[in-house]
Amino acid sequence: MKVYEIHLRFVKSFLIEDKDLILVDAGTPGSGKIIIDKLNKMGKNPSKIKFVIFTHSHIDHIGGASEIRKTISEAKFGIDENGVEYLRSGKIREPILHSSVLKFIFSIGKPFLFKRFDGVNVDFVLQEGELIKGIEILKTPGHTNDSISIYLRDIDVIIVGDTLQGTKNGLKYPNIYEDFNELQKSVEKIKSLKPSMVYVSHGISSSKFLV
Ligand SMILES: [Zn+2]
């Protein structure tokens, strides 16, 4: 089993390669084609993707979902129950900001950042526990109430989406969160696994916790 980071403009998607392929997150609106192109360049056949799952329903994680659906219609799309409505209808989940710099960036970037996007049919709801053998879903709310992490026990790595943010020195709390208490609990849950690598959507993936 292996994890690949797929670098998009300012966010990442991830590919889990096992017997099947699993795509994690779909980037901003317009990223769908970029992801498919990158997979092809990596020598991974997009039609082998069995599941497309989402770490949470912020637009930079689900915006490209409908474009991916058009290319790989066979794959099953899954998200936490609290994210279903956002993914299905293309509804915007407003990020809850806790940084003045971010508030400024979002205030000027809003029309660009929050372009409407098409929703997709949700095939299944992610539950805590094994999705398929060796691939475990952990509910890790806080950043949003639909944030999940994907733990690959056999290779001792975890994909946490935005529950942690990567810096050049290690992993810190994100500046965007809905519930800090929940976020802290989720980070403790992740830390308790002592993963050898924590894959984050923004910044540098690492195994070093600064929090
Ligand atoms: Zn987010």
Image (tube, helix red, strand yellow):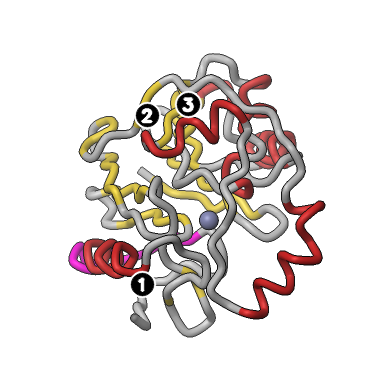
* Quadrant containing the N terminus in the rendered view: top left
Q: Earlier in the sequence, mark 3 or mark 2?
A: 2
Q: In the figure, residue 64 lies in which quadrant?
A: top right
Q: Work out whether residue 193 or residue 101 is closer to the camera in this orientation and state it.
A: 101
Residue 210 place in picture, x, y as percent: 37, 83
Badge 2: residue crowd in 10 Å (few <14, some 14–19, many ≥20): few
* Structural distance between the alpha carbons of marks 3 and 2: 18 Å
Residue bearing the label numbered 1: 207
Q: In the figure, residue 125 lies in which quadrant?
A: top left
Tag 2, which secondary structure? loop
* Quadrant containing the C terminus in the rendered view: bottom left
Discs 2/1, front: 1
Tag 3, which secondary structure? strand
Badge 3: residue crowd in 10 Å (few <14, some 14–19, many ≥20): many
Q: What are the residue bounds of the magenta stretch?
A: 191-200
Residue type at mark 2 is Lys
Residue bearing the label numbered 2: 19
The label shown at residue 77 is 3
Q: Earlier in the sequence, mark 2 or mark 1?
A: 2
Residue 208 place in picture, x, y as percent: 36, 78
Residue under the point 61% across and 32% down: 65
* Structural distance between the alpha carbons of marks 3 and 1: 29 Å
Residue under the point 28% across and 52% down: 155
Asked if the magenta segment contains residue 104, the reply would be no
Residue type at mark 1 is Ser
* Structural distance between the alpha carbons of marks 2 and 1: 26 Å
Q: Is residue 162 left or right of residue 99?
A: left
